[in-house]
Every structure is written in structure tokens, then in C-alpha cells.
Amino acid sequence: MVDNGSSLAQIKPTGDIEYYLILWLPNNAIPYVKPGDTINIRYDAFPSDKFGQFPGQVMSISSMPASRQEMSEYTNVNNGAVQQELALYKALVKIKNKEFEYNGKNLKLSDGLKAQAIVFLEKRPLYMWMFTPFYKMTQSVSGPLDD
């Protein structure tokens, strides 16, 4: 007897398969990320200190935040209290390398891998990053803002 929701078969495509990563962006990252941007991907199955990071390209970003119902459809989504307070937007990322070589072995990605993404929100020279705290401090002590 088969229970409701049980899998009877799985379909595995053959040939050249395109892999995509579903990435959930918080609302404070949306102004800085756009389709075409490059991100770095770290797979939990392939630790970054050993295998490095993998490139990906943002293909699309939803214009509306995801509903709780949509989020519940994904098993790997972190449902922590902090995540539920933020509006999350679904981004589709094309994975550039589907396979890679390590110690003479050819390793391939597979469906369902859990990953983390490094999203580059802005580019600034190093000296600007170093002096940002001083710049903010001078703004905070300069007095009240004019209305």
C-alpha cells in the first residue's frame, strides 16, 4: 500500500542540464542586487575551505516578497524567527559550473544541495571601507539636520 504523498518514481533528465539555485534575498539587499550580477556560491556538501567558491549569475528577482505559503514549499529554507520577520525575495541564480575536478576526480553537482551565497552589494575602494566609521562619526556629531 502506498501512502498519500509518497514517491513512486523519479524522473531523471539526460543530456545537458542547466542547474539553478533558488536564493532568498532580504529586503535590505534588493536595491543593490540586479539580474546579471555575479555571486559566489558555497555548497554545504563541498566545504569552501577545501573546494573554494563557485560562480553564479542572478537571472531574475521577484518583485514581490515571498508568502509564508511559498516559503513552506521549500524544505531547505531556514525558518528561524529572524527570517520570518524579514521580507524575503526569491532570486533565481544560474550555476555556471555543474562539475569540477578535485584530486583527479570529476565531481558533479546534484539536485537538492544546500548552499550559501555571497552577494556583493556594492563596490568601494578599500580606503573607503576603512574610513567609513570616521565619516559616520563626523556626521553624527555635526549637529541636528535642517528640516
Image (cartoon, helix red, strand yellow):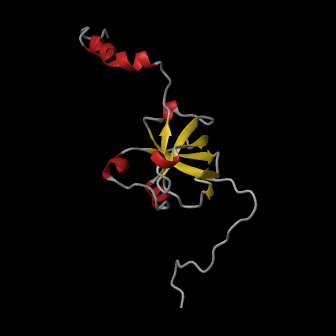
* Of the pair 128 and 93, the residue shown nearer to us: 128
Residue at the (59%, 45%) spot, across then down:
93
Residue at the (55%, 51%) spot, across then down:
22
On screen, residue 80 versus residue 51, left or right, reads left
Could you tell me residue 3's position as x and y percent? Answer: 51, 84
Q: Going by the picture, which residue comes out furthest to the front?
A: 104
On screen, residue 138 versus residue 24, left or right, reads left
Could you tell me residue 125's position as x and y percent? Answer: 47, 18
Q: Going by the picture, which residue comes out furthest to the right?
A: 15
Residue 35 falls in which quadrant of the image? top right
Image height of 85 relative to 32, above or below: below
* Of the pair 53 and 13, the residue shown nearer to us: 53
On screen, residue 11 versus residue 39, left or right, reads right
Residue at the (59%, 42%) spot, across then down:
55
Image height of 100 relative to 30, above or below: below
Could you tell me residue 110's position as x and y percent? Answer: 59, 60
Looking at the rendered structure, the number of numbered marks drawn on it comes to 0
Image height of 79 relative to 144, above or below: below
Q: Going by the picture, which residue comes out furthest to the bottom?
A: 1
Could you tell me residue 48's position as x and y percent? Answer: 47, 46
Residue at the (58%, 61%) spot, across then down:
111
Tell me the quadrant of the picture where the C terminus can be found: top left
